[in-house]
Amino acid sequence: MKHIEKLKNAVKSSEVDALFLLSEPNRLYATGFRSSDGAVVVTADQAYFFTDSRYIEAARAQVSDAEVLMVGGTKKYANLINEVISSHGVKTLGFEENALTYGEYASFGEKLNAELKPAQKLVSDLRASKDTDEVETMIKAQRIAEAAFLQILPIISTDITEKELAAELVYRMVRGGAEKESFDTIVVSGEKSSMPHGVPEDRKIKNGFLTIDFGAIYGGYCSDTTRTVCVGQPTDEMRKVYDTVLRAQLSGIAAARAGVSGASIDKAARDVIAAAGYGEFFGHSFGHSLGIEIHEAPNAAPNSSVIMPRGAVISAEPGIYLPGRFGVRIEDVLVLDENGCKDITNLTKELIIL
């Protein structure tokens, strides 16, 4: 997806004369072109994409809504950006204060002939509300990841290691069309399932809960899913914890909609877990936004007063983690509008017993 026109309109109604994007996620959002190096400058009526000789041929073929210029030799980024500044009469240049390093900020501040002004929110607000094409791409990413998950279920046993299972899942996602995994795949079993971000180890999967947190990137956009399955028969307490997490997730999903705060969504789920006596064992938030990056804003978190916009895509992932014993997390992905939300995850949430 390309969003140059949205960025132009945002510049028109902003306090900056142009926008300077250096981070890879925001360059991808603007142009739809992936590269490890480059810069984008957007004015109210024109856009420019700068990159080096490694990407110039592909960029000129793929980027149609921005003028593509090559850096190299005496044509440094600052020199070319200054030409844009001069030709468009730019006085203030909005930059990504959350993305630029201090060194980059100091260097560009010294070399560019315009005042650098923080403008991260201008881009973040646009990215917080996904359009139809973005949502459809994320659904495709979800389906790729879900198919891979279903493919690995038959090979789960105490004869395979956590690392081997994680590798099998990633392989199947890539074979199914993913560019790569959205993040380091989490596969933790037995007592390690109490670690929300535990790391797969070269040890055989243990009986008990097995938490699998996984995601695929497709078309530059991420999916994110967690399922906790049980290897062997669960105890009554394990069933109680699983059912509590599921009820909490469903309560949060029922509360999720555009126009409400992230904190109110989180509270709907957190109250269920607290009422069951497990409040101290739910330490993270109900959910985070995702898109080009696996963690975006806004979040459905306890202290988040930010109002969820229409088109926000957030995870729904409450959990209970009993240290040294076991843990449960169930995660879906939601698309919000004023009437509620659409759950774009297709996997069952009933406890799978293997």
Image (cartoon, rainbow, N blue to C red):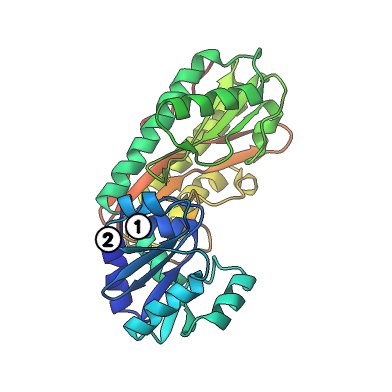
Quarter occupied by residue 138: top left
Quarter occupied by residue 188: top right
Query: Is 150 in front, or is 327?
Result: 150
Q: Residue at x 50, y 19 (%)?
A: 152
Residue corresponding to mark 2: 65
Q: Residue at x 55, y 76 (%)?
A: 108
Quarter occupied by residue 83: bottom left
Is the C-beta separation of discs 2 and 1 under 8 Å?
yes
Q: Residue at x 41, y 26 (%)?
A: 176
Which type of secondary structure does the marked residue at label 2 adopt? loop
Q: Is disc 2 surrounded by few (<14), some (14 to 19) or many (20+) residues within 10 Å?
A: some
For residue 8, side relative to residue 179 (left or right): left
Q: Is disc 1 surrounded by few (<14), some (14 to 19) or many (20+) residues within 10 Å?
A: many
Q: Residue at x 44, y 52 (%)?
A: 55
Residue corresponding to mark 1: 31
Q: Residue furthest front?
A: 73
Q: Is residue 274 above or below residue 115?
A: above
Visible in this render: residue 250? no
Q: Position of residue 254 (x, y in %)?
A: 36, 47
Query: Is 146 in front, or is 10?
Result: 10
Q: Position of residue 92 (x, y in %)?
A: 42, 84
